[in-house]
Image: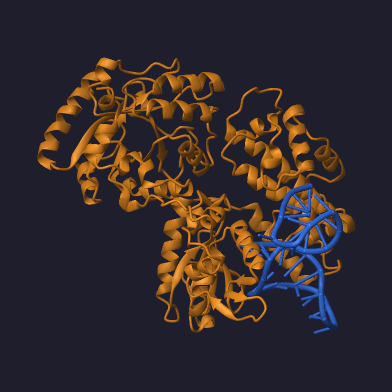
Amino acid sequence: MESVLYREVFETDVRNKEVAKLLGDIADLLEIKGESAFRVGAYREAARRIEGLSFDVETLSAQGRLQEIQGVGESLAARIDEYLKVGRVQYLEDLKAAIPAGLVELLQVPGLGPKKVKLVYEKLGVMGIDDLEKAAHEHRLQALPGMGEKSEDKLIRELERWRNRSRRLLLGDALPRAEAVAEMLQGCPAARQVEPSGSIRRRQETIGDIDILASSDSPEELMACFNTLPIVKEVIAHGPTKSSVLSVDDLQIDLRVVKPVSFGSALQYFTGSKNHNVKLRELAQKRGLKINEYGIFEGETGRRIGGNTEEEIYNALGLACMPPELREDRGEIEAATADRLPDLIEMGDIEGDLHVHTDWSDGHNTLEEVARAAMAKGYSYLAICDHSKSLGVAHGLSIERVREQRQDIDELNERLHPFRILAGIEMDIRADGTLDYDDEVLKEFDIVSASIHFAMGQPVDKITQRVIAAMRNPYVDVFNHPTGRIIGRRYPYEIDLEAVFAVAAETHTALEINAAPDRLDLNDISVRRAKELGVMIAINTDAHAIPQLEFMRYGVATARRGWIEKPDVLNALPLPELLARLKRSRSK
DNA sequence: GCCGTTTTCGGCCCGACTGTTTTCAGTCG
């Protein structure tokens, strides 16, 4: 882990993630050591809280306010302070010295928990994956208490799977697959309601496995139908109400079946998140109620008081039912208690897409094709933002080409009226903070958005100042994909988002949620912070081909996870209001 | 290790499935 001594300023997100990882590492080791599950849980809970924080843990530490974070008490605050000051925590170093590093990895193998890891370590001297595999093949595991031949065989299979495990799926890959499986299930005669649940329903940006909930009057029949779907390669586990299979493309799909009367409570339960549900159950407990996947019950009498729908569960606790995207235990239960849940942006609120490419630069379709596709989606406007000249690899437009494209746009607008194509540009912010065209050219556009595509390795101060300079330009309306991350492939560049948000709010520059499934940039946590600071959001697909206009749903999902409401979104404005909002109009 | 309309100690969500057990522990979500 990189030490604080080497870098002076960090982007909030990265810094918080470091601290979260630190606490998570401690939790793993404590778990193997056999510490109280509650102590372990406390570290995990704090780690999760800090990762979900929308402000900088380092600032809190400096102000001595760490204990204001839920789940952080005296001793955790001390550990965090120590890490931020010294760059390491002695407590963790001691744990590491006592416990082989390979054991932590073992925890990730499905079916292996802390107890078994401890067992194989102490009895067989297993220090890591390789040791364990060897012990299993030599049938040395069978002799251990609580282990047998079947456990050993299962473990061998799991180890093999784990070695070839695929990374987490992007929401954009997982959601369509889940919807396809749900549709197939709906074709089983025994199926009643079918709904993807779990992290997919919450629209998390990446997904581990696909969870589907169904209701049926004869669950076993539906289960049998599921297990024999053509996409099923292997049945991992199955009982009368729950089944896990491996699909032909190596995804784990879990199906849970309940009676129709319990569908609502089961859907609530299997949508999670885990922490949201824990909180909800605690709340129920305090009110003498009990929630499980079959309904909500009076604690004393056991009488069932609801559960046919999700609303019944929440309402029984005096809460309004809340959208799945909010259910992360990031304050939504408190908000519901105070009757202050946000009224989240919806797909139907989107009036247009403000970042789309055509074959004038690196897009695949013509101006007219893209415009007609946007019209078919029910949009009332579309901003064409092809690349500016710096981006040679993407056929960035020279000033002459920009003016030619403008003529085409004007002609097309006459034909497509009242639909409106906005002449825009995706303007590269050059390494020195200057822009590709000067203001005399910029003012010819209807809308200008700015992006960073190179010199991403600059130090945090430089890159932040570069972006701030662009946002201060009187014609730059939007800053695109603000962190530059590509999920699973490229880390965000180091940028001080707090500073960017402040200037964005001050200069009325909107920040993008780039809806491409491998970007989702800004992410949910950052976008929520941006909103808190009064920043306007634009949700754009950055489509380079017509089918990619469909990415809008992932951008809207991310916005919803960030508590964004319709008035926060630039492209939820009708055309006249949108035009009035842009800087060129403001300055008049 | 945290926390408090059950408050400074004694709790901390709940059920399904598996494999080992003959009543349950471990793991998972």
Residue A398: quadrant of the picture: top left
Query: Front-most of A322 and A133?
Result: A322
Say if A311 sits above or below A322 in the image: below
Residue A466 in the image, given as x and y percentages of width and height: 46, 19
Can the viewer see residue A544 in this picture? no
Horizontal placement of A111 versus A490: left or right? Answer: right
* Image coordinates for residue A226, horizontal then vertical, percent: 50, 74
Q: Residue at x 62, y 53 (%)?
A: A164
Which chain does the orange colour mark?
A
Q: Of residues A143 and A253, which is closer to you in this image?
A: A253
- The relative height of residue B10 versus residue A108 in the rendered view (above or below) is below
**What residue do we see at 51% from left, 41% from top?**
A487
Query: In which quadrant of the rendered view does residue A15 lie?
Result: top right
Q: Nearer the viewer, residue A240 or A140?
A: A240
Residue depicted at x 30% and y 17%: A437
The residue depicted at 63 percent of the width and 59 percent of the height is A279
Chain B as rendered: colour:
blue
* Rendered position, A457 above or below B21: above
Q: Is residue A72 left or right of residue A207?
A: right
Q: Position of residue A217 (x, y in %)?
A: 49, 84
Q: Would residue A212 be seen by someone viewing this image from the given angle?
A: yes
The figure's colour scheme reads by chain
